[in-house]
Amino acid sequence: MDQSFDASVYVRAPIINIANGVTLANALVAACPEAAPENVAKACTKLKAAGEAGQKALTARRRENGILSEEDGRVLDREADGSFGALRMRLIAYSMLPQERFPKARRAGELVNELFGDDGLSFLAAEYSVQNTVMASIVEHIQEAGLQPEIDALAGPEFLEQIGNVVPRYDMMVKDRLQKEAATSNLTPVVRAIQSAIVSYATKVVGMVDEDDPATIETVRRALRPLDAHRETGARRAQGARGEAASGAPAAPASPSTPAAPAAPAAPATGAGPAGGGSLGAPA
């Protein structure tokens, strides 16, 4: 047998994700030798089925991820930040008026503390799920304490109208993200199934090698070349990452983190949808 042929590298589970796992499975199926032995053909059929299942799972995840893009989430987050920041600044501005001439200035200051406390707007820097919970609790307090008429008189009705509009959309965004996270974790069994099918197929293909027939080694190499290419690509990426780390090159900017399965966010107040404004409603 050709001493340069190492069968062991082909019978280890490749490191894959759902996307490149599907690609690798399809490439191996396409490279399956013609007139392959029955056991190889059967393993190839199972590998093809695993790849097709992976493709369906990937398509479903992309469909779910299309509910709200990462950029849409950042835009909505900035809108929510601005909405609550604007209300707080409006009340602070009113509280700075001389109380002897404007008696409601004192109450404006009290409302700032009642709604935002000592931490102010620090919750706006928290992860999306935490921000969603705090915003919902502020809205709920306004409703339960009957503060809307008072706030509308001090700040103007536009501020709570905007908050009533943005909070339900923000809550939907957070729930969508949690669903995406669950969908991603659900892909793990699919990835493992593809790995198992690849190992089973590669093992049977390697079994086609005949020590007395060097041509069989070339046949096996051609059939398993997609695995070689996959390993080589992974090695180049790892080498590139080590090179960047050694050179001190800055990492790419990180996008806002996806919340990690927190407790279900508090139900926010219902308000008008994106198409129009509306006053603060009762909690859902």
Image (cartoon, rainbow, N blue to C red):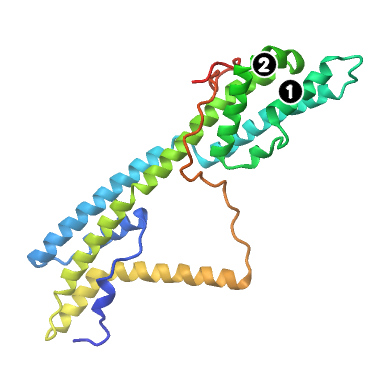
Q: Position of residue 105 (x, y in %)?
A: 83, 19
Q: Are marks 2 and 1 in contact (CB under 8 Å)?
A: yes
* Callout 1 secondary element: helix
Q: Is residue 196 above or below residue 53?
A: below
Q: Is residue 92 above or below residue 70?
A: above
* Callout 2 secondary element: loop
Q: Nearer the viewer, residue 111 or 284?
A: 111
State the residue at coordinates (69%, 36%).
121
Say what amino acid the circle numbered 1 marks: Leu
Residue 171 in sight in this render: yes
Q: Position of residue 98 (x, y in %)?
A: 90, 20
Q: Position of residue 17 (x, y in %)?
A: 37, 57
Q: Would residue 52 be found to the left or right of residue 208 on screen?
A: right
| Quadrant housing residue 144 | top right
First in sequence, mark 2 or 1: give its number.
1
Q: Is residue 97 above or below residue 172?
A: above
Residue on which disc 2 sits: 147
Q: Nearer the viewer, residue 226 or 199?
A: 199
| Quadrant housing residue 219 | bottom left
Q: Position of residue 80 (x, y in %)?
A: 62, 31
State the residue at coordinates (22%, 86%).
2
Say what amino acid the circle numbered 2 marks: Leu
Query: Can you say which quadrant of the picture contains the N terminus?
Result: bottom left
Q: Nearer the viewer, residue 33 or 178?
A: 178
Residue on which disc 1 sits: 111
Q: Would residue 234 be found to the left or right of residue 134 on screen?
A: left
How many C-alpha atoms fall within 10 Å of the one at disc 2: few (<14), some, or many (≥20)?
few
Marks 2 and 1, Cα distance to the nearest angstrom? 9 Å
